Structure formats: structure tokens, C-alpha cells
Image (tube, helix red, strand yellow):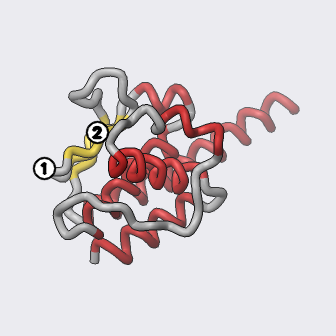
Amino acid sequence: MLFFSLISSFFVANSLFSIEFNELKKRLEDYNFTVKIESPPVRSTYGLLEIKSRTIWIEPLVFDLGIALPTLIHEATHAAQLCGGKGEIRALNLPFSPPNISRPFFTHYNHGLRRHLEAEAYAVQTHPDGYNLVLSLLDKHCK
């Protein structure tokens, strides 16, 4: 009976996760972004937003790693930054910062703007309510 409960919990958790991922993907598509579940054209990345084509790539491996939703949240934050900049990516100047543990992922960028953009994306990705937060950022900046 315990085995059945664990299996049921696994499927419930994954289907809830899938619903959020699919809803965020749809919201991005509603705002004229294309979301591709395939390896990004830049090696060694889990996700990528190409500004000119408004295309987001999500590396399929993130599903196996259990980080598909956080990866999409990160790229959706960049989408909101693009919408907020009216075709040019710009910082949204959010009132919170990413956790210190995420700093090695963006402090290597030499360009101040790129570092700030990545810091915002990690701040939203790691926020306790990151999913709802990114939906509101998209609605605010992409409508």
C-alpha cells in the first residue's frame, strides 16, 4: 500500500508540475514568443531566449533533472524584460535580489547590463512564488 501511495504522489506532483509548465508556455505563446523543447543553439545552456526571433529554447534534459519549470521561469523573465524594453531587453528593476548561492551563475558576465538581467532572472526563478510572479511580469510588460 505504501508503494501505491508513493507512485500516486509521484504522478500527482508531476502532473501539477506539467500543468504549470504548460500554462506558462501557453502564456508566452499568447505574447508571441515561440517555445521550443529542444537543445538551444548555444552549447551548455539549459534555456535560451533569442531576442530577434522571440524564440525560447528549453533543453529537454531539464525534464529529467527536474528543473524544467524553473528554467522556463528564468527564460520567461527575460521575455518580460524584452517586452518591458519595447523590443530591446532591459532590466525591470525588481525590488528583490537573487540568493547568494546563485551568484556564480551570473557574476562572470563582464557587461553590467547582462549581469543585471541575469540576476533578475535568477531572482524570479528562485523566488518562493516565482511562477505567479513571472506570470504577473509577463502580463504587466507584454500586454
Distance from label 1 to label 2 (Cα)? 11 Å
State the residue position of label 1.
53
Q: Is residue 143 above or below residue 87?
A: below
Residue 127 vs residue 25, the one in the foreground = 127
Residue shown at the point (33%, 59%) measured from the top left: 26
Q: Count neighbours of disc 1 (C-alpha within 10 A) and say few if under 14, some if 14 to 19, many if 20 or more.
A: few
Numbered marks: total:
2
Q: Secondary structure at mark 1?
A: loop
Q: Secondary structure at mark 2?
A: strand
Residue 40 vs residue 105, the one in the foreground = 105
Where is residue 142 shown, x and y percent of the image? 28, 72
Residue shown at the point (42%, 69%) measured from the top left: 137
Q: Mark 2: which amino acid? A: Trp
Q: Count neighbours of disc 2 (C-alpha within 10 A) and say few if under 14, some if 14 to 19, many if 20 or more.
A: many
Residue shown at the point (36%, 48%) measured from the top left: 112
The N terminus lies in quadrant: top right
Residue shown at the point (29%, 22%) measured from the top left: 43
State the residue position of label 2.
57
For residue 55, side relative to residue 137 (left or right): left
The C terminus lies in quadrant: bottom left
Q: Mark 1: which amino acid? A: Ser
Residue 67 vs residue 121, the one in the foreground = 121
Where is residue 135 shown, x and y percent of the image? 45, 67
Where is residue 117 shown, x and y percent of the image? 38, 52
Residue lying farthest right?
1
